[in-house]
Each structure stands twice: as structure tokens, then as C-alpha cells.
Amino acid sequence: MPTYKAPVEDTLFLLNDVLHLDRYGNLPGFADASPDVIEAILAEAAKFSEEVLTPLNRVGDKEGCERHPDGSVTTPTGFKAAYKQIIDGGWIGISVPAEYGGQALPATVTVAVNELLCSANMAFAMYPGLTQGAIAALLTHASQEIKTKYLPKMVEGVWTGTMNLTEPHCGTDLGLLRTKAAKQSDGSYKISGTKIFISAGEHDMSDNIIHLVLARLEGAPAGTKGISLFVVPKFMVKDDGSLGARNGVSCGSIEEKMGIHGNSTCVMNYDGATGWLVGEENRGLPAMFTMMNEARLGVGVQGLAQSEVAYQNAAIYAKERLQGRAISGAKFPDKPADPIIVHPDVRRTLLTIRAFNEAARALVLWTALKGDIAHRSQDEKERQSADDFMGLLTPVVKGVCTDTGFANTVMAQQIFGGHGYIAEHGMEQFVRDARIAQIYEGANGIQALDLVGRKLGKDGGRALMAFFNEVQTYLKERAASDEMNVYLKPLGASLAHLQQASMWFMQNAMAKPDNAGAGATDYMHMFGLVALGYMWCRIAEAAHAKLGNGADVRFQAKLVTARFFMERMLPETATHLVRIQSGAGSIMELPAEAF
């Protein structure tokens, strides 16, 4: 059975010593998020993740969810009781305004907590995670009447939320959407259509499920400009807040899928279901994107989370598994063989995963902090700058963290050899569960196209130039630091590669857009490496300061891991640059029938 130890100390180090959350006390909610408060929250989340959710992870994988003839769905053994603890602990509303029953703490704290839940049990964590995304969309776009009616129960957790975009014939291209909405005389709408791949679409853990559904009004403009967003409850909600009749929405089936078996991925049928408009008519996509951006950051967390739990188990196994002797001579002559941790290639594998995990955690938290600033700052310029960073970094976090997270689960599985292929050790489940994160909430190829095709040139490249400026300023201010040069110089070289690639797109993609499409994934991963390298520089700087105070050896380990990243991982930006500059020629040359 796999184990999990929540990385609370590492998260606190990032929040307190690298990101300096204490410097944001002027923002609403931050003054209440003292180091002691955050430590207490993470400690409780760690206990819940380790003791309750981790043992249920394999249970959920083996049992899955079951749909009954009446369309109801039961979740795996133990899930309902565990979800009751989510409600009792107030975990869903950590960052929601107090007026709706939340604690109004920074969203950065919620993101930190969600990593622990996802590492312990990704399929389970999706239920509250999707509810948090639905809450965010309603907070931003719904009328006060809808907020008052739905949010308190959703924040409490007794009602859950979903997002309904995908249809059998359309996924990314929502302009093809067919689900219809017919306006009624009382101001409500009748929603008819079929949605697929709806995570947590039907289950037995909450009293009501609040579906956010994209649909097209009769006579609406074609394409994405004619899509509206509706709130469609499973059970109608009476004026006094009590539940009424069952609405015309049902689970047609549960998808048979590769992983996350503990989450009910449903085909949802809307048969004249009653819904209410969220925001303005034909402006549903911007409203849904509020939820999708929350979800994309959350999916990036899932990639990191699976990488972390897979690493932990692989590291334990490498220190215990006896196999062969070290090539430099026996290290444990009193044993029949050395543990495989003595072998350089095993260490290379483990350090590759670890170097990603620690920097990715910093990148995720940094991005979440930018989101908090964008939503809470009173300074318009500061809000705009933070929002720019969020827009730029979200596809990078989603794409890079999930691509790399999946690759890392495969590498961790490899440490186990044949035992990694057997269910008993749990590694093959991490691989299967991690795979979906590359696909949903916008497949990673789409994230790369969004980054290159939309985000780079947005507002005249304002966000990109701000990122370049921040990293360059950081490098210049520390150029005289001998102890930091081992990290700064590689980052400077890779930043130059990213700048060259950005310029190449400007010069070669306008006339020939295929050049942008051909290089988009390489650019996204190059950007990710530079962002991770920047995080490692900041981590190393904070670790050096800790060492100066005589702190424990774990900070020395961070410096070694940072050096490994700079030596063995960051140089890949050079390869990405060569690929980008090769253009689209060979990629687009073959006629379709030749494939």
C-alpha cells in the first residue's frame, strides 16, 4: 500500500520565506492569515489527507462509482463519511467572503491545502475542488439573488457544484455547442441537451448538486458569441431555501475510464430542466472562464500532487530495495546487496522528480498569490499587473505541471521495476490518475496555443515584458553574489533562450501562423523551465539565509537540488529553442492522406 506524508514544512517555508506572505497584510484577508494560522490549517489538512483520504485512494480506484437504474449514483466505500469531514471542517470555504459563510482567507491558502488533498486522493478531492470553482464563477458573475440562494449551502459543502461544457460533438470548440435554452415567462429558462465527461455530475455525498451549464438561446448568434451560462440545480430550491421537486436533469451513464475511478464522470441529460441565467445573455463563455481558470490552476496542482506522492513512494522504495552492488564498490557489505539508492541513474530519476516538485510548488503558490492580488488589491495598477501575470502563467502552470507530473509518475513507477506495474504498490494508479490532468480543462496542446497565440501578444505583450523585466531585475540585483552565481548564470542563459524564441515568433509567425502552432508546446515547456528556474533561485536564496542561521540540513538539500536543476534540467531550453526555430516545414509538409 502506498503512503503519503504531507509536505507541510516545505509549503510553510515557501509561503513564509520565499513568497513572504506577511508583506501582503494590507490586502483583505491576509492579516488574518498569520504564520500560526496557516500552519494550523495545513497541519489539520495534512492529518485529514494522511489518515483519512490516503487509505481511501485505492478503495476508490478498485470500487469506482455505481449508477443505479433510477439514475442515482453511489460513491466508493468511505467517500461519503470522508466528505462529511470536509463539511464539518469548513474546508470548501477557506477563501470565500464571510458574508456567504467563508473564512475570507487568501486563495493561496486554499491552493496549498488542495495540493495535500489531491496527493492523498485525487478522485475524491475533485468533488470539493469543482464546488470551489463553481463558487468562484457565481461570486464574480451571478446576480445577488442567485448568490444569496445558492452560495451559503455550497460554501458549507452540503450542496456541491459542477461545470458542464463538453458535448459529444464538441470539446474545445464550444462554438459548436447545441444545448438549448428557452426563455420562460417567469424569467427562468428551460435547458435541453446532453453533456459528457461531467466530473462529479451525480453522487450521494451532498443534498443538492448545482450545475453550471453552457447553452445557446433561441436565435442567439452563431459560434462562441451566442453562448450563455445557466445555474441548473438537481433539486429546485424554494424561496425559504429548502429543497423542492427534482429538476429535469439526470445522469444517463458513468464513463468507463482509465483513472480517477472514485470520481463520477457522468453523461448528463437535460430534459427541459429549469435554469437561471448567470450574467448576461450570450456572455456565458467569459463567466465560465472564471471557473475554468480556477480549474486550470487546480489541475496544475493535480499534476504536482501526483508527482509528489509518486516521488515519496519511489524514494522510500529506493532506500529499501536491495539489488546489485554500487558500481564504485559495495556500500553495504554486510547485506546481500546494496539498496538501489546507491545507483547514479536511480538518484538521477529521483532528483529529476524532486527538483520539479519543489519548484512547481513554489510556482503554483506564486501564481495563486498573483490571483489574490488581482482580486483583493485596492491599487488598480497592482491589480492589473497581477491579472496579467495570472493570464500568462495559467496555461504554463496547467500544461507544464500536468505534462511533467505525468512523466514523473512514470519515472517513479520505473524505480519499482516490475513491482511498479502491479497494483499492490499503487504506482500504476498514480500513472493512470495523473494522465487525465493533461487532457481536461483544455488539453495541453490548447494551453500551448493559448499561450503563444493569445497571451504573448495580448495588450502589446505587456504581461510577457513584465515577466522578463521581473526576472532580469532579480538577476541584476544579485549579480555580485558569489554564492548565487551557480544558479543565476544558468537562469540568465535560459531567459535569453526564451526571449529569442519570443522574438522568433514575432518575426516568423505573423506571415506563417503554422510556425506558432508548430513551436507552441516547445515554447510552453521552455517558459515553464524558466519560471521553475526563477523559483529555484528564490528558493536557493531563502535556503542560504536559513543556513546562515544554523538551520537543519534540509536547506542544504535544497541547494543541492537547485544545483541539479540548473545543471541537468534547465539546459533543455536550448533544445526547445532549436525546435522552435526549425519552423513548421517538416511538420506541415506531408499531405493528410500520407499519415
Image (spheres, grey):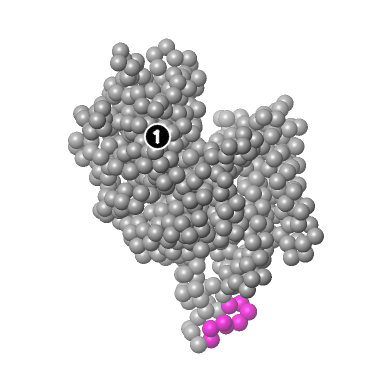
User: Which residue is at a point 74% across and 48% down the rendered structure image?
Assistant: 472
- Residue 554 image position (x, y, % from top left): 57, 69
* Residue beneath disc 1: 163
User: Which residue is at a point 42% across and 28% down the rendered structure image?
Assistant: 142
Front residue (pair 489, 316): 489
Q: Quadrant of the C terminus?
A: top right
Q: Is residue 77 visible?
A: yes
Front residue (pair 17, 313): 17
- Residue 414 image position (x, y, % from top left): 50, 62
- Residue 220 image position (x, y, % from top left): 44, 14
User: Which residue is at a point 47% across and 69% down the rendered structure image?
Assistant: 316
Q: Is residue 331 magenta?
A: yes
Q: Is residue 414 magenta?
A: no
Quarter assignment of residue 151: top left
Q: Quadrant of the N terminus?
A: bottom left
- Residue 74 image position (x, y, % from top left): 24, 45
Quarter assignment of residue 519: top right
In this rendering, the answer to whether 227 lies above or below 250 is: above
Classify residue 375 as left or right of residue 242: right
Magenta stretch? 326-333
Quarter assignment of residue 57: bottom left
Q: Residues within 10 Å of mark 1 (few under 14, many from 20)?
A: many
Q: Is residue 564 visible?
A: no
Classify residue 290 as left or right of residue 203: right
In this rendering, the answer to whether 549 lies above or below 185 is: below
Q: Please tell me whether the stretch drawn in magenta is mainly helix, strand or loop.
A: loop
User: Which residue is at a point 67% across and 29% down the rendered structure image?
Assistant: 459
Front residue (pair 111, 519): 111
Secondary structure beneath dot 1 equals strand
Residue type of the residue flagged with mark 1 = Met
Residue projecting furthest to the right:
480
